[in-house]
Image: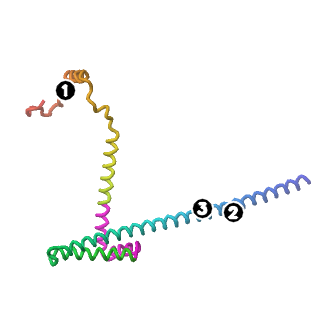
């Protein structure tokens, strides 16, 4: 009987230990999952703030560029020989519009640009889609051109200059002899050969 009581006691202790281990594992898993969630949120928040800072810097650059172009166009219109001519008036109008856009970007930042794009897309969806397609096409062409240019530069770097140098005169004579003795392949049946005659 003592053996049975000891076995029951050992079984109970084993159950208790297994339950403790399972509870501890659950708590650890929850803790690890919560830590991972917090770290992911921190990384996402950092990435968002970094993107927002970069976008704000780009908006400032865009604003400065638009302001400069607007001033240059305004100077062109002011220095025109015929200030009442239609070209001068159009130039003045473009200068004013660019200056207004630059001031708005300075005042409202990237959020104002995003709001303007949203408003334009809502009010004129056809023009927005057409502009998006055109911008996508232009970006694709620029990327393709840049890739082709990179490939050409890479190919130039890989050319073996030793192989391009002319070989000795005796090697040229040997290659000319071998070319002269190599027979040309016969044309396929039914195909015209020189002079329009078929073989």
Q: Nearer the viewer, mark 3 or mark 2?
A: 3
Task: Name the residue at 17% across, 73% down.
Answer: 80
What residue did someone put label 2 on? 27
Q: Position of residue 129 (x, y in %)?
A: 31, 68
Q: Is 150 a magenta residue?
A: no
Task: Report how far apart the C-alphas of labels 1 and 3 lie in the structure.
Answer: 72 Å
Relative to 137, residue 181 above or below: above
Give residue 184's mark.
1
Task: Report how far apart the C-alphas of labels 2 and 1 lie in the structure.
Answer: 83 Å
Q: Position of residue 32 (x, y in %)?
A: 64, 61
Task: Report how far apart the C-alphas of labels 3 and 2 lie in the structure.
Answer: 14 Å
Task: Give the quarter of the image for residue 107.
Answer: bottom left
**Callout 3: SS:** helix
Q: Main secondary structure of the magenta part?
A: helix
Closer to the N terminus: mark 3 or mark 2? 2
In this rendering, position of residue 79 left or right of residue 115: left
What residue did someone put label 3 on? 36
Alpha-carbon neighbours of circle 3 within 10 Å: few (<14), some, or many (≥20)?
A: few
**Callout 1: SS:** loop
- Tell me the magenta residue range: 108-137
């Amino acid at each position: 009987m003592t053996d049975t009581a000891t076995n029951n006691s050992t079984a109970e202790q084993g159950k208790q230990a297994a339950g403790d281990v399972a509870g501890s594992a659950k708590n650890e898993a929850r803790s690890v999952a919560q830590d991972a969630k917090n770290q992911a949120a921190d990384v996402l928040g950092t990435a968002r703030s970094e993107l927002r800072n970069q976008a704000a810097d780009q908006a400032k650059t865009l604003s400065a560029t638009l302001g400069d172009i607007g001033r240059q166009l305004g100077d062109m219109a002011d220095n025109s020989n015929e200030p009442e001519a239609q070209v001068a008036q159009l130039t003045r109008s473009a200068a004013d519009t660019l200056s207004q856009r630059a001031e708005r970007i300075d005042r409202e930042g990237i959020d104002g640009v995003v709001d303007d794009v949203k408003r334009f897309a809502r009010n004129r969806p056809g023009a927005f889609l057409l502009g998006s397609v055109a911008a996508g096409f232009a970006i694709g062409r620029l990327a393709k051109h840049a890739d082709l240019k990179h490939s050409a530069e890479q190919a130039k770097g890989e050319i073996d200059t030793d192989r391009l140098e002319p070989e000795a005169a005796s090697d040229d004579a040997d290659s000319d002899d071998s070319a002269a003795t190599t027979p040309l392949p016969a044309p396929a049946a039914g195909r015209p050969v020189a002079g329009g005659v078929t073989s």
